[in-house]
Image (spheres, rainbow, N blue to C red):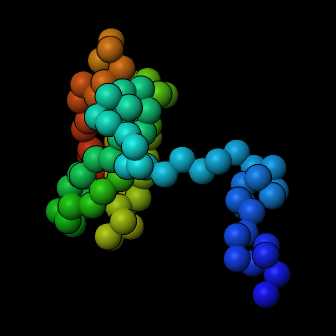
Amino acid sequence: MPAHRDNPPNVDELYGLDPLIEPGHGESAADDIGGLQPQTVHCPYCGEPFETTLDLSSGSTSYIEDCQICCQPIEFTVEIADDGTLATLRVSRGD
């Protein structure tokens, strides 16, 4: 068997890609400030909880995301505190 099969090169290096950063690998709670933060919400239509990811780096914003359970449009209103942390999150029906 060729040596390259026993010790394959890093795929990122092989193709000149930026390394993939996996959530939860070597991160602390402080790393979520101003970045991506997982959040469990309850759908205002079906009431089921599901996990989504909030992007705190985009500042206070509103957007529509479909429920992962019933596919109904949910309006997310995200307010970011001055220190870059999540101040409030409101979910409401998008209709």
Q: Is residue 16 above or below residue 82?
A: below
Residue at 40% across / 43% down in the picture? 26
Q: Is residue 82 above or below residue 44?
A: above
- Residue 54 seen in the current view: no
**Residue 38 image offset from top left, x and y in percent:** 33, 47
Q: Residue furthest top?
A: 82
Where's residue 3, x and y in %? Answer: 79, 75
Q: Relative to the observer, which residue lies in front, 25 or 42?
A: 25
The one of 88 and 45 positioned closer to us in this rendering = 88
Instruction: Please give the name of the residue rendered at 42% of the width and 39% of the height, measured from the top-left corner.
Output: 36
Q: Position of 83 compared to 65: left or right?
A: left
Instruction: Name the residue at 32% across, 14% down.
Output: 83
- The answer to whether residue 73 of the structure is visible from this angle is yes
* Left or right: 18 in relation to 95: right
Q: Quadrant of the N terminus?
A: bottom right
The residue lying at 23 percent from left, 29 percent from top is 88
Residue 42 occupies quadrant: bottom left
Question: Can you tell which quarter of the image residue 43 is in?
Answer: bottom left
